Amino acid sequence: MKTTPTFPFADTPNKVVCEKPNCCHSRESGNPCGLFPQTNLLRAAILSGGMVSHAPTGSGMLLAMLLLLLCSTIAIAQPKVITFRAESGVHLRWQGVRQPGFAGYHIDRRTPGGQWNRLTTTPLQRATTQQEIERVAGFKTDLYLTLFDAAKPPRDLTAADYDRVLTRQNNGLLEAICVVNPEFGKLLGEVYFDNTLPAGTEAEYRITALVGDAEREVGISSIVGMEVGTIPPPAGEILGEAGRRTATLRWERDPALLQRGEVITWNIYRAENVLGPFEQINTTALLPLSVSSDESPQNQDQQTFSDEYLASGTTYFYHLRAVNVFGMESAPSMAVEITPGSAELPPPPQSLAVEEFGGTARLMWAPPSRGEVTELRIYRIDMTAQEKEFRQVSPALSATRFRAGEWVDISVEEGSQYRYFARTVGANGLESPTSDTVAYRAADATPPAPPTGVVAVADTGSITIRWEPNRERDLLGYQIERSSDDARISRLLLNDSIITATSILDRLPRQSETSYGYVVTAIDRSYNRSKPSAMIFARMPDVAPPTAPTIAGLEVNDGKATVRWMPNSERDVARYRVYRSNDERRKPQRVGETSGSEFTEPLAGDGRYFYSLSAVDSSGNEGAQSQPVAITYRHQQRPAPPRSVKVERGKEHLQIRWEAPTAAVAGYVITRIELKSGEKRTIAQPNNTERQFKDWHVDGSAEYEYIVQSRDSEWRLSEGVAVRVGKER
């Protein structure tokens, strides 16, 4: 047999095997290793704390464990000082001297490289009175007194008691018990708290002991840094095992944390409700020891605790907290649930069936003829949901309702598909195997809502229709219809099969000018159809350019060129672009753009000009240019205008008079404008000898404007001279 202790102040790991002949096998040998004569001490330390557990049980194994501990030794390494910096100060703990004549400890402190300063004015002493021991140890007082043979009857301790016990050889068990019970360190005077170290300051500590008339050094700590220490977490995972009236906990321990004193033991907490309250159940600290033999191997890095005398069938919740060498607890571990009792599984329900019952699902079963059943749990999966997982569908049914043989699920939704199975729960809290699985589909006569948010986006050669997804859980998909007739009565189905996507692409001829209407219909798993969505419209982008315009005329007047053309027949022509070139072989340049059918621009000088046109539709498509039309322009001086133009009203006419210009002219042109209607008409072309003209086609109630111009022999006109005449009075 072997035992593996792992503690601060000891070499780690240090497996110790008793090599003394017949030591662990001879019942007549008494106490051959000389460790401890007090069997009651061992029983108190081991049994009350649940310190060690192992696979075999019974008095034979217990005796083997006790003998093993008696034969074990813990090798003590060079004494050292363990420190822990908290918010309020620095905690110190050390393994003290074990020599007669002990008179106390002194604590010195210095900054790194500085001088030692004594913190204690009087030496730290070991506790002697029962009152002081009870104040520090609490319910562990009896164990502490037992260590020093002062428990029966309880009495004060003396220096002789400490010397007698602490100076024994092979005191490994006592040292281990003191390490895992931080209160005992305080009682031995081997714990100190320094609350005077300023924040942000590093320091190291020296422990000295007064032995006889001399002061000797016990140990020097490592440098205490400026950062506050953290208590390590408890074990990651707790494994729980239920017995008939017991609960066994197992968890992994970290030898490195044990060696450094960051974890030295664990406290076990128990509750009958997952929310608590949790109470500590180990009355003494757990020793981190593992016992194994060839017949019963034990994981050397696993800690075990057994909770006995529990109520069968009652569920208990456990968590543990790690404790460091100063007695500080970690946060709780994850809780583990254990129900002691028989490990036999109850029988499942028989002949599970389901039927429709007034819009609900009624489940029926036959209770098993054997076994004690306390409740029934029914599990359901919704095959139409995204997360397909069996879940308990309702609170567990009591034994009375279970024996009734039926249960109604009123939470089913129209059109959804479900599967059910059931399990019984025995008095030991264990679930039975799964029953048969049955399927059920809820009837559905309610159609989905019409799809909303339908939009159509046209592109070259296609139209994309999109819509918002419906929220019905039993939705199967969508169908899309297109209408192209003017009355929007006939519709063509775009998708032969139902689609689950929320968009569809409708490919169409690129040159199509038809306006298309679209509707979307939702369909559920029961093939109920929604009303169609509101119809939306789209048409293909116009990619066909207009035809080339036909130029109707091109003339030059007063140094300006005017182009006229016939309007295009296309209804979507928005404007015309005018191009000009001085050379028929060169690419013309655009000189203007208009929505009308005429364009005028001044000419830069004499020469030959070529004009062409193109039409542009409302989609921005520009057609081909027309055939160019040419005109030649030669600049000549215009004749001088007439002088002293007058209009006089006669009895039934208006008489226009003027004087000839100083330069000779070939004749005159008279234009009349009726001001109200805007009608403009050339009314006379007198020769160069005439100086007046009578207009007999006038209305006395109208207003007129007359423009008189001179002309030369080539019919070039002068600037016009305008004269207005009012109504007849």
Image (spheres, rainbow, N blue to C red):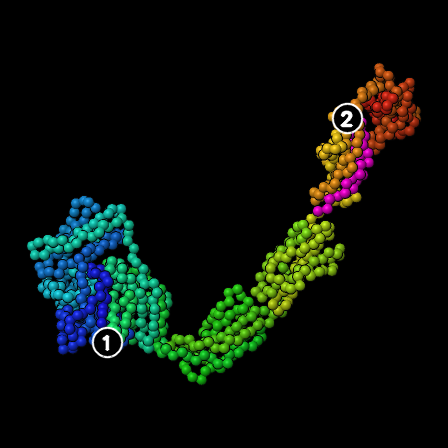
Question: In this rendering, is residue 291 above or below 489?
Answer: below
Q: Position of residue 263 (x, y in %)?
A: 27, 60
Query: What is the quadrant of residue 297 in the picture?
Result: bottom left
Separation of residues labelled 2 and 1 (CA atoms): 129 Å
Secondary structure type for disc 2: strand
Residue 553 falls inside the magenta stretch: yes
- Residue at left offset 18%, top offset 68%: 72
The residue at 65%/51% (across/down) is: 457
Residue type beneath disc 2:
Gly
Q: Residue at x 80, y 38 (%)?
A: 550
- Magenta stretch: give its range: 543-568
Horizontal side, residue 404 vs residue 548: left or right: left
Q: Residue 714 appears in which quarter of the rendering?
A: top right
Instruction: Tell me if residue 344 comes above or below residue 87 in the rendering.
Output: below
71 vs 232: above or below: below
* Amino acid tagged 1: Met
Quadrant (top left, top right, bottom left, bottom right) of the C terminus: top right
User: What residue is disc 1 on?
Assistant: 61
Examine the rendering and report whether any part of residue 700 can be seen: no
Q: Secondary structure at mark 1?
A: helix
Given residues 555 and 228, the one toward you in this image is 555
Residue 500 in view in this figure? yes
Residue sitting at the far front:
585
Q: Is residue 619 left or right of residue 667?
A: left
Q: Residue furthest left?
A: 213
Residue bearing mark 2: 607
| Residue 105, image x, y percentages | 14, 55
Q: Give the quadrant of the N terminus.
A: bottom left
